Amino acid sequence: MTLLSIVMPVYNEEQWVEEIVSRVMSQPLNVERELVIVNDCSTDGTRAVLDRIEGKYPDSSVKVIHHSVNQGKGAALRTAFAEARGDIVLVQDSDLEYSPADYPRLLAPILDGRADVVYGSRFIGEVHRVLYFWHYVGNRFLTMMSNMFTNLNLTDMEVCYKVFRREAVKDIRIRSNRFGFEPEITAKIARKHLHIYEVPVSYSGRDYSEGKKIGWKDGVKALGCIVYYRFFD
């Protein structure tokens, strides 16, 4: 049976991580699954929560790795990708902004042989929480710039939910340590001329009082990554 590797970077999510793991592992799927969690040197109680969670799954379907130094989302995903054993790899954030209930629609284009890569999209018709106008503008601007440099027509380059056939990305080296992962992986899969699909996903965004971490400086850096990974890597 097909094995799905769900890779989850975690940083200071003591309040939410146990719930998202429960949702990931209880989601009914027609594939086997493993969950690879990388704790990026959290400074709250996340480590203890994750160690307890790992102990609940003695069948090794949940694996927790702890970074000794905080490095960022991209670095955590680099570690998780190296540990993942699945035929398909799916990126899952560790908060509750994205719902594992969307897994079947994300996996369908790969499982039926149409796609090598599937992106979710928060902007093509699904339910979403109403939050920050300028975040929306920033996301759309970065997606447009990415599309200009990659010649893709994505609607949501910055979305968390990205799913890959292992063969499609096994030779891609991720260099970005922080949120530059999104434009970097997009640029590198675009160069490979893979079959890319996009499907709608629901979104329940957080505000900063609820622990949201990405800010305008990350948007500026993402713009630099769009250019850099198009021409220099």
Image: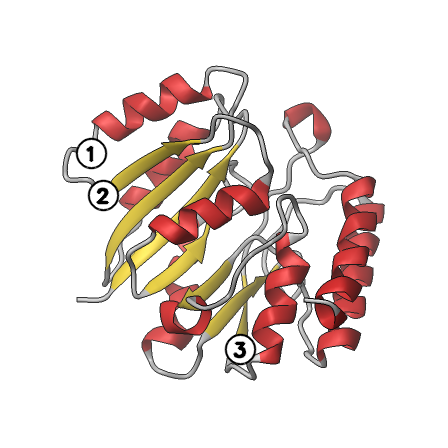
Q: Which secondary structure lies at badge 3?
A: strand
Image mark count: 3
- Residue 5 or residue 31, whichever sits in front: 5
Determine contact: label 2, label 1, CB under 8 Å: yes
Mark 1 and mark 3 in contact? Answer it, CB < 8 Å: no
Q: Residues within 10 Å of mark 3 (few under 14, many from 20)?
A: many
Mark 1 belongs to which amino acid?
A: Tyr
Q: Nearer the viewer, residue 75 or 141?
A: 75
Earlier sequence position, callout 3 versus callout 2: 2
Tell me: 65 left or right of 76. Answer: left
Q: Look at the image and tell me in which quarter the C terminus lies.
A: bottom right
Question: In which quadrant of the rendered image does the N terminus lie?
Answer: bottom left
In the image, is residue 199 above or below residue 5?
A: below
**Mark 1 or 3, nearer chain start:** 1
State the residue in front, 232 or 52.
Answer: 232
Q: How far, Cα to Cα, is label 3 from label 2?
A: 28 Å
Q: Secondary structure at mark 1?
A: loop
Q: What type is the residue that disc 2 sits on?
A: Ser
Above or below, 87 against 151 in this view is: above
Q: Which mark is residue 57?
A: 1
> Which residue is painted at 75% across and 72% down in the image?
231
How is the structure coloured here? secondary structure
Tell me how far mark 2 sits from mark 1, CA to CA.
6 Å
Q: Mark 2 sits on what residue?
A: 61
Q: Secondary structure at mark 2?
A: loop
Q: Position of residue 80 (x, y in %)?
A: 41, 47
Q: x, y percentage for residue 32?
A: 22, 57
Query: Label 1: how many residues lie within 10 Å, few (<14), some (14-19) or many (20+)?
Result: few
Please tell me in which quadrant of the rendered image residue 153 appears. bottom right
**Residue at the image position 44 percent from the left and 43 percent from the top:** 8
Residue at image mark 3? 196
Instruction: Name the residue at 52% across, 16% down.
Output: 44
